[in-house]
Image (cartoon, helix red, strand yellow):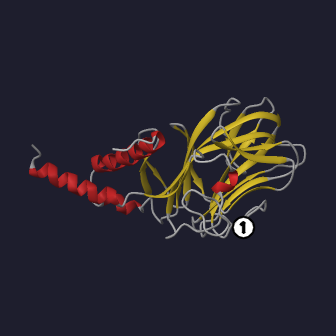
Amino acid sequence: MIRKWQLILVLLAAGACSGRAALLFSQDFSSSSDVSSYVSATDPNGGQWNDIATSGSGVSVGIVNGTLQYNRTGNNTGSFTRSTDFSPAPTALIYSFDLMVNNVTAAGSSVGTWYVGSGFSSGASVPSTYNSRFAVNFNSDGTFSLHVVSGSTSSEFASGTTISLTWVINDTGSILSYLGPDGQNDTVGNDKWDLYAGNTLVFDEQTADGTSTSLTDLKFLFTADNGKGYGIISMDNFQIESVPESHAWGVTSGAGLLALCGFQWWRQRWEKSLHVTT
């Protein structure tokens, strides 16, 4: 039998967690082997980009083994762009996807870069303004590393290894609390971002590049100087969610409630990844 105080706590938790996150974008490339089915230039749904493209024969793109795969063998660029704004504009995002790199034949720094910002255009052009970005390096021994552009670099990952990335970007104006993949109640400061590889916090409290730029658009570019950055980048299981400003976590006080909200959020992500319904 549920006691009155327990029922009140459950109802308060439901109220607190109801504003916790909203799914903005989700794609696992399971519905089609045709890249064009994941693109709508003018009216993309919650699993489509405005543009998935290459700038020439030096890069190919396709759906391979249920992943979005770019194979760069020459001096051209592969890209995707989501320029249709998320609405309303989120003030914080949790951006997650699986990444695999293999068949590295030419090393390079920041050969693949992911951007979040606004006002992005389709194609191979680098955004002129953006809120946050991170990159991947190809190493001469065939491994790959994550990279803060003009900053630090992670440890190496073996070729063919799939890593699950979780990128938490905070533009709320205050500290954001969230339950990380490491199972800890973590925080990220305003105009900062955290990046996890699996359960490991790889980059902590990195400063956003453009703090006045909103979090409405997505961009990926796979490119490098001539003769560099040749290899394959595969991505899967994209999920992008907005999260509330930090005060929204505090509808009721207490670390236990924060943990409960976070547990429910991660449980939902796990169920989605397994296509489980309850």
Outermost residue toward the right in this view: 226
Return the x and y of residue 89 as percentages of the image width and height: 52, 69
Q: Is residue 265 left or right of residue 201?
A: left
The three-letter code of the residue at mark 1 reads Ser
Binning the other alpha carbons within 10 Å of mark 1 as few (below 14), some (14 to 19) or many (20 upward) gives many
**Position above or below: 146 against 128:** above
Return the x and y of residue 116 as percentages of the image width and height: 62, 60
Callout 1: SS: loop
**Position above or below: 103 against 68:** above
Q: Nearer the viewer, residue 158 or 200?
A: 158
Q: Residue at x 60, y 56 (%)?
A: 207
Q: Residue at x 68, y 31 (%)?
A: 160
Q: Residue at x 65, y 31 (%)?
A: 161
Q: Nearer the viewer, residue 173 or 1?
A: 1
**Quarter that holds the C terminus:** top left
**Position above or below: 222 against 49:** above
**Quarter that holds the N terminus:** top left
Q: Nearer the viewer, residue 19 or 190?
A: 19
Quadrant in which residue 213 is drawn: bottom right
**Position above or below: 245 against 164:** below
Q: Give the total number of marks visible in the rendering.
A: 1
Q: Is residue 114 left or right of residue 126?
A: left
Q: Is residue 205 left or right of residue 140?
A: left
Return the x and y of residue 187 as percentages of the image width and height: 45, 51
Quadrant in which residue 52 is drawn: bottom right
Return the x and y of residue 184 as percentages of the image width and height: 41, 41
Q: Which residue is mark 1?
A: 121
Quadrant in which residue 165 is drawn: top right
